[in-house]
């Protein structure tokens, strides 16, 4: 025992078992706790995506297959990493996230495509940091919320959380990438709710947010404003009045609806040669990404379309189930955040393809072509699988 002033410090060494504390890199798991049901649904959905991409643009299916294989491998490896240990580096994740988004915006390393600077190109590596940002934010807030859980309903904590989420949000919005910035806001709401924010605060937030959003959209649609770009404003107007924009901004969505409807119950068949095919006539320019659901609807019909919807719902609900069984708040936030991300992004993509929502440009999770999105989602699901491995066991 060593005394310094009025303070006393013990020099006795106390043995610590890191595994018991849940902070070691690896833990002992039981194979029966592995969520094979979730893995099966993910692989099935990704397989449908590979097939649809092969039909939409045949040269890309091998890349998607390689991406899916790499994503599944990464998911399995990550699933055995103790997420409690990984989350110790939550501030590093946040800074890396900001750094990558900053490179896209300010360094000139970003790749400008289709009027938006969203891709980072370093040598032969080309990826989209806004896709990884979704996963990194979920992981960051999982630990941040757990560390300050007792303060989650205080003004100080909520204000600090909003600021921390707003920094990457602004950087994504300025790319410009309105659709992904909307996803970031929704994911932030999911993780805050899963973290235990009060229902009263949720209701109050909706009471303020709904009329505020309505006012902002109304102002944004006015011709003399800079809230939205001209192209973004046009997308909303084409949704409100599709006939006026039938040959321009509403063209893709109208053709998408035609393709899905033409598939009827059974579909026209995989890689069919029908001259009446909307896909074969190249009437959908982004068939491999934003409108991949139209390809599925046309070729596999209602049965194929509903299969994709059921798989997306199944994945989201399985994540919610894992969240309810999680050993701690961080695990709950990770699983609920990933489930919410898949559900919301899937809903928006299908909503665009069926013309019940304005065109946003969001990929369909695990289905659309895009290696950054695919890898990021699989890696996020790896953490969900680890949360399940460490779930509370019934006594």
Image: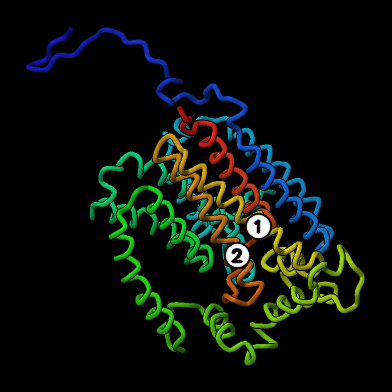
**Residue under numbered circle 2:** 362
Q: Which residue of the protein is positioned furthest toward the bottom in this rendering?
A: 244
Residue at 54 percent of width and 39 percent of height: 383
Q: Residue at x 65, y 51 (%)?
A: 374
Q: Nearer the viewer, mark 2 or mark 1?
A: 1
Note whether 172 is above or below 114 in the view shown: above
Which residue is at a point 33% across and 56% down the rendered structure image?
A: 163
Q: Mark 1 falls on what kind of element? A: helix
Q: Residues within 10 Å of mark 2 (few under 14, many from 20)?
A: many
Residue beneath the point at 48% across and 30% down: 393
In terms of sequence position, does the residue under pointer 2 or pointer 1 come before the other?
A: 1
Q: Which residue is mark 1?
A: 310
| Viewer-closest of 35 and 276 | 35
The location of residue 384, given as percent across then percent down, is 54, 41
Which quadrant is home to the N terminus?
A: top left
Q: Residues within 10 Å of mark 1 (few under 14, many from 20)?
A: some
């Amino acid at each position: 025992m060593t005394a310094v002033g009025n303070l006393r410090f013990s020099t006795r060494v106390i043995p610590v078992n890191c595994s018991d504390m849940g902070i070691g890199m690896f833990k002992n798991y039981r194979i029966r706790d592995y969520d094979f049901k979730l893995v099966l649904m993910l692989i099935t959905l990704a397989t449908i995506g590979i097939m649809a991409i092969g039909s939409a643009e045949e040269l890309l299916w091998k890349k998607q297959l390689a991406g899916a294989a790499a994503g599944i491998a990464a998911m399995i490896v990550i699933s055995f990493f103790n997420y409690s240990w990984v989350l110790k580096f939550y501030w590093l994740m946040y800074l890396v996230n900001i750094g990558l988004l900053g490179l896209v915006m300010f360094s000139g390393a970003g790749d400008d495509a289709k009027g938006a600077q969203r891709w980072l190109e370093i040598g032969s590596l080309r990826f989209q940091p806004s896709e990884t940002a979704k996963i990194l934010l979920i992981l960051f807030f999982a630990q941040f919320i757990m560390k300050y859980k007792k303060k989650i309903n205080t003004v100080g904590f909520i204000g600090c959380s909003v600021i921390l989420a707003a920094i990457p949000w602004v950087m994504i919005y300025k790319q410009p990438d309105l659709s992904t910035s909307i996803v970031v806001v929704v994911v932030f709401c999911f993780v805050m709710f899963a973290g235990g924010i009060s229902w009263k605060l949720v209701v109050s937030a909706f009471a303020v947010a709904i009329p505020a959003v309505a006012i902002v959209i109304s102002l944004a649609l006015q011709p003399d404003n800079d809230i939205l770009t001209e192209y973004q404003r046009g997308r909303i107007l084409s949704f409100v009045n599709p006939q006026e924009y039938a040959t321009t901004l509403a063209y893709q969505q109208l053709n998408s609806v035609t393709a899905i409807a033409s598939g009827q119950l059974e579909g026209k068949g995989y890689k069919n040669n029908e001259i009446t095919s909307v896909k074969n006539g190249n009437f959908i320019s982004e068939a491999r990404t934003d409108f991949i659901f139209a390809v599925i609807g046309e070729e596999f019909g209602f049965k194929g379309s509903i299969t994709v919807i059921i798989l997306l719902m199944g994945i989201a609900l399985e994540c919610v189930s894992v969240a309810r069984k999680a050993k701690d708040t961080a695990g709950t936030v990770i699983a609920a955040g990933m489930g919410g991300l898949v559900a919301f992004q899937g809903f928006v993509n299908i909503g665009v393809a069926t013309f019940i929502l304005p065109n946003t440009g969001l990929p369909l999770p695990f289905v659309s072509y895009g290696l950054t999105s695919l890898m990021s989602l699989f890696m996020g699901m790896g953490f969900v699988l680890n949360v399940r491995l460490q779930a509370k066991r019934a006594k």
